[in-house]
Amino acid sequence: MRPDVRRWLHHRTFTAERWRASELVSAREIRGTTVSVVLPALDEERTVGSIVATIREELVERCPLVDEVVVVDSGSSDRTAEVASAAGARVVPVDTVLPRHGSRPGKGEALWKSLHATSGDLLVFIDSDLIAFDPQFVVGLLGPLLTDPTVGYVKALYDRPLTTTDGIVPSGGGRVTELVARPLLNAFWPELSGFVQPLSGEYAGRRELLEQVPFVSGYGVELGLLVDLVALAGLDALAQVDLGTRQHTHQADAALGRMAGQILQTALARRPGTDRPERELLQFLRTADGLEGVSWDVGVVERPPMRSVRAAEGRPRGRS
């Protein structure tokens, strides 16, 4: 493991249980900081209401940590908007925000427009398809931002149970992460290899940073933000918080393929230089003592065409 990544993992990885909502209320009042929670949504009537209601009950009314809960609706065809509004969210149709700029499909578009539709100094983004949502997710993501002014952006890490025909795989589910995003980051931005869940849909950041970087309209938004923010603010301005377990709906392989394609396009548009990529791949295992990073050498060697080898050695075909 790279020394800078090892140091960052030790210095900038936290657990959500480290903070209590009541303690963070005091911290934000001292600094006069406001907080907006944003849920991008597209046809999520089954889950969005419960998430919004939980945040409002626990973190707006019972413990005033959050100032506003906003659902940015990307043209849902079901009752997402009605359910979210009834639960207490302010619902903003994505095509009504900055209409002169038009509207693009994709989650990243909703996140970008939420910067214009909200007012908080800190923004917390929560996917609207979460099952058994825990308000500590919001508390944990806000913890580093409200207690350390040098932290500007916080990503969630978690286990993602994957339901299969053989039962539930406790830590599976991050298929695009492990097959696409992690290899790309390790190869071209190895300083970011310590992020356990680089594509997590739960993260928080300071408005002053988020308004300085572009937002990819589709599924490449999370990878794009990581790459652009580390270039803007440096690795130590980024952190991650262990939220434990996250359950959500899973997509079919064809949909994951489209997601992977958008992530690949996002990475290629930011690929630095033409140097040979890093050979090390850092993966993570959940152990009894916490998370353990395991490094692998995934470098490959290309052999030249055999005809050129024979020509250089002056040997005819078939002779040893």
Image (cartoon, helix red, strand yellow):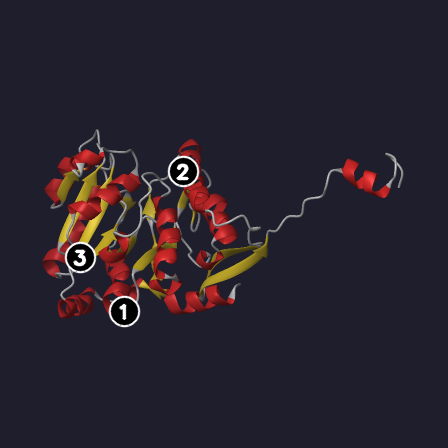
In the image, residue 239 lies at what x, y percent?
35, 62
Few, some or many residues within 10 Å of mark 1 (<14, 14–19, 20+): few
The percent coordinates of residue 320 (x first, y second) are: 89, 41
Asked where in the image residue 64 lies, by quadrant, the reply is bottom left
Disc 3 marks which amino acid?
Answer: Val
Near mark 3 (Cα within 10 A), the count class, few <14, some 14-19 or many ≥20, is: many
Determine the CA span between mark 1 and mark 3. Answer: 16 Å
Residue 57 seen: yes
- Measure the C-alpha gap from mark 2 to mark 1: 33 Å
Distance from Cα at disc 3 to Cα at disc 2: 30 Å
Name the amino acid, label 2: Gln
- The mark found on residue 262 in the picture is 2
Q: Position of residue 273 (x, y in %)?
A: 50, 49
- Circles 1 and 3, Cβ within 8 Å, touching? The answer is no
Given the current orientation, which residue lies at the most extreme top position?
77
- State the mark number for residue 35: 3
> Which of the two labelled residues, at mark 2 and mark 1, occupies the earlier sequence position?
1
